[in-house]
C-alpha cells in the first residue's frame, strides 16, 4: 500500500489556500521550483492532476478539490494530536480547563476535586474572558471551558453547552441581632448593595425584577469577578447579591447569613466542549460525576 508523504500534502494544502505558487513558496520558505517538484511528486503518487493553470492563476481540478478536503482533515488531525500530547508526561492524562472569571471558584473546586491528587492526572487551569477561552478551545489548546454563560452560536465553530448545575441566588449580609425582619423587595432600597456587573445573567434578571417592582436599589459596587464579589460580601456592611455557592464557607461559619433567597433568579453552570477526533476521557468523567 502506498504511503502519503505528509510534507507533500502540506505543500499542496498551502498552494491551494494561498492560490499562488510564489506566495505558497514564500510562506513555506522554499523556492517555487522546489515546491513545484514536490507538487508533481504528489500528483504522480495520486495519479491525478490537482491544479490547472488559467493564465497566471492556479485553479483546483475536481481531483484537487477532493484532495484538499482530505488534506485539511489530515492536517487538522495532526494539529489536534500535537496539542493533545504537548507537555504530557508518560503515564499521565492531561486535562486543560478554561474557567471564566465570573464563575464561582468554589464551584470549580467542587467539580475538579475528584481529580486532585490522582497520580495519573495532570490539571492545567486557565482563567479569562469567555471569548478568549472559546478561541483556545476551538484551537485545541483547551479541553473544555467552564462558564456561567452558554457559548453563543458561531458559524465557524460548533460548541456544545452542557448544563452542569443550576443554583439559587440570594441576598447575603452580616448577622445582626438588631436587624429587623427583612421584607423583600420593599426593604432593599435602604441597604447598600453589591451586585454582579452588568451583562451577567444574574444582574439582568435582578434589574428586570427591580424594574417590575418599581424599585431603585442603592448599588454601591458592581463586580465582574466572583472571587472579588466574595471579598466584597465580607466587607460590605449592607447586602450582596450572590449565588450561595460563592460564599458557602462564610455561610457555614456564620460570617454571613442568607437574608433572603430570590425566587425566579438562578445561576447556571456550563461545561462547554467541542467534538474531538481524539476526545479527552476526563471531560466525560467530570460531566458524568457532576450529573450524578
Image: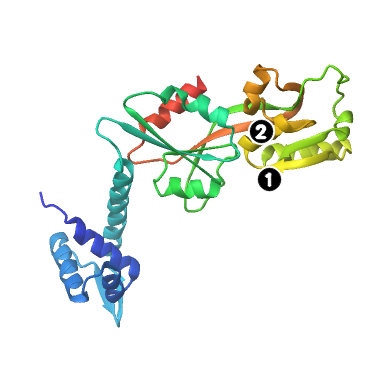
Q: Is residue 110 above or below residue 9?
A: above
Residue located at (29% from left, 44% from top) = 81
Q: Earlier in the sequence, mark 1 or mark 2?
A: 1
Give the quadrant of residue 254: top right
Residue density around tag 1, few if under 14, some if 14–19, many if 20 or more, within 10 Å:
few
Tally of numbered tags = 2
Q: In which quarter of the image is residue 208?
A: top right
Where is 3 relative to 288, above or below? below
Which is more toward the observer, 174 or 6? 174
Q: Which residue lies furthest to the bottom in this view?
A: 55
Element marked by disc 2: helix
Q: Say which residue label 1 marks.
A: 199
Instruction: Name the spot of residue 244 as percent of width and height, x first.
Output: 67, 25
Q: Is mark 1 on a helix, strand or loop?
A: loop
Q: Distance between the residues labelled 1 and 2?
A: 21 Å
**200, 154: nearer the viewer:** 200
Left or right, 12 with respect to 133, comes to left
- The label shown at residue 271 is none
- For image coordinates 80% across by 40% down, the residue present is 219
Q: Name the residue under label 2.
A: 231
Instruction: Name the side, left or right, on which 95 lies relative to 132.
Output: left
Image quarter of residue 171: top right
Amino acid at each position: 500500500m502506498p504511503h502519503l508523504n505528509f510534507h507533500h500534502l502540506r505543500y499542496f494544502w498551502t498552494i491551494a489556500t494561498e492560490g499562488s505558487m510564489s506566495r505558497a513558496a514564500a510562506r513555506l520558505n522554499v523556492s517555487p521550483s522546489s515546491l513545484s517538484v514536490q507538487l508533481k511528486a504528489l500528483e504522480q503518487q495520486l495519479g491525478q492532476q490537482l491544479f490547472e493553470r488559467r493564465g497566471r492563476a492556479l485553479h483546483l481540478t475536481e481531483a484537487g478539490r477532493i484532495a484538499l478536503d482530505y488534506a485539511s482533515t489530515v492536517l487538522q488531525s495532526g494539529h489536534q494530536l500535537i496539542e493533545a500530547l504537548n507537555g504530557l508526561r508518560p503515564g499521565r492524562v492531561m486535562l486543560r480547563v478554561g474557567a471564566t472569571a465570573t464563575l464561582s471558584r468554589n464551584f470549580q473546586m467542587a467539580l475538579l476535586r475528584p481529580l486532585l491528587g490522582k497520580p495519573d492526572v495532570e490539571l492545567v487551569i486557565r482563567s479569562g474572558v469567555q471569548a478568549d477561552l472559546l478561541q483556545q478551545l476551538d484551537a485545541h489548546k483547551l479541553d473544555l471551558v467552564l462558564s456561567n454563560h452558554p457559548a453563543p452560536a458561531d458559524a465557524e465553530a460548533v460548541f456544545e453547552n452542557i448544563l452542569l448545575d443550576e443554583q439559587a441566588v440570594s441576598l447575603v449580609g452580616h448577622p445582626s441581632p438588631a436587624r429587623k425582619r427583612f421584607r423583600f423587595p420593599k426593604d432593599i432600597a435602604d441597604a447598600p448593595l453589591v451586585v454582579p456587573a452588568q451583562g451577567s445573567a444574574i444582574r439582568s434578571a435582578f434589574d428586570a425584577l427591580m424594574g417590575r417592582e418599581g424599585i431603585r436599589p442603592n448599588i454601591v459596587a458592581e463586580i465582574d469577578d466572583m472571587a472579588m464579589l466574595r471579598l466584597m460580601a465580607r466587607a460590605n456592611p449592607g447586602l450582596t447579591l450572590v449565588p450561595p455557592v460563592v460564599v458557602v464557607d462564610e455561610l457555614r461559619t456564620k460570617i454571613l447569613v442568607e437574608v433572603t433567597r430570590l425566587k425566579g433568579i438562578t445561576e447556571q453552570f456550563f461545561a462547554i466542549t467541542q467534538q474531538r477526533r481524539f476526545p479527552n476521557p476526563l471531560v466525560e468523567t467530570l460531566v458524568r460525576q457532576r450529573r450524578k
